[in-house]
Amino acid sequence: MNGTAGVTMAVREDWQRHDRLGLPEAELRQVAHALRRAVIELVRKHGQGYVQQGLGAAEIFASLYFHEARIDPSDPRWDARDRCILSTAHNSALFHAVLALRGMIPVAALEGYVQDGSPLEINVSERLGPVVEGTFGSLGQGLSVAAGMALASRIRGVPYRVNVVLGDGELEEGQVWEAAMFAGSTGLHNLCVVLDLNWMQVEGHTDSVLRLNPIADKWRAFNWQVIEVDGHDIGALLAAFAQARGQTERPTMVIATTVPGKGVRALEGVISHNAKLPADVADAALRELGATA
């Protein structure tokens, strides 16, 4: 057995000792609820931020980090970990809250969110350390990096999956479609993208900039398995992830339709990329979210 084969076997044995956290649906709903509270609390300190995206994607991140992804919070450099790419790097309040709740950073670190000099930046950055797989301040780059990681898994013989959260506005970037063509052409079946389809970008509704539909047909044309779900339906998200894991020939695109500001009546459905969050609105939101989900 040569050195590479020996390393690969060791990694496979290590991988088999790890499992997904696999929380059941009821607990994942509690996680999503806690994440929404955390998003409000983090953005409240500054009166403005990426609150709408964070509230809207809570179920996606709860399902990914607390059920689907094989990760070891005590060892973020574990070679066979599933890679989780946040291409929508501005969704930082939600992402940092996820890391804290999952035990990947100290909860106390959230106190420094977007403070000068803090590694918890407004756009998620590798300054935070190995818990961040890549810095994607320019939208449209995450899928390219993820495709490279998925190909590396195949070449190295290290069994991991690569999950990407992609924004719908990012579909206007040509780089996304180059990566989609590459991944479909090379059959990167260990690659799964969740499209957070909230119809919102900096300029407003996505259709006011460029028409995105027919989204599903476009990805199918690039040789992707496409699954369309309600992004707030945890059962549907878990089923989609399971279907993606069972795919052996092509990458998977999960189109998850979400509502900006989900869970807070005053914010639900409001299209605001970088939203104002006055103290009175934040306090009312926290009271509304105070009840157990």
Image: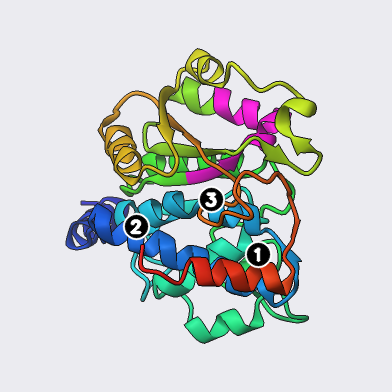
> Residue tagged by mark 3?
262
What residue is shown at x 60% (from left), y 69% (from top)? 284
Near mark 1 (Cα within 10 A), the count class, few <14, some 14-19 or many ≥20, is many
What residue is shown at x 39% (from left), y 52% (from top)? 64
Q: Check disc 2 and report its element: helix, strand or loop.
A: helix
Q: Position of residue 127 (x, y in %)?
A: 65, 71
Q: Is residue 46 visible?
A: yes
> Residue tagged by mark 1?
125
Q: Is residue 131 visible?
A: no
Mark 3 belongs to which amino acid? Answer: Lys
- Write down the quadrant of residue 210 in the picture: top right
Give the answer, above or below, for where 107 lies relative to 193: below
Tag of residue 23: none
Relative side of 220 to 245, left or right = right
Specify the segment rendered in magenta: 164-181
- Write down the quadrant of residue 89 in the picture: bottom right
Quick check: marks 1 and 3 in contact, CB under 8 Å? no
Mark 1 belongs to which amino acid? Answer: Ser
Mark 2 belongs to which amino acid? Answer: Arg
Q: Check disc 1 and report its element: helix, strand or loop.
A: loop
> Residue tagged by mark 2?
29
Give the answer, above or below, for where 125 lies relative to 251: below
Q: Position of residue 47 (x, y in %)?
A: 75, 70
Nearer to the camera, 131 or 273: 273
Near mark 3 (Cα within 10 A), the count class, few <14, some 14-19 or many ≥20, is many
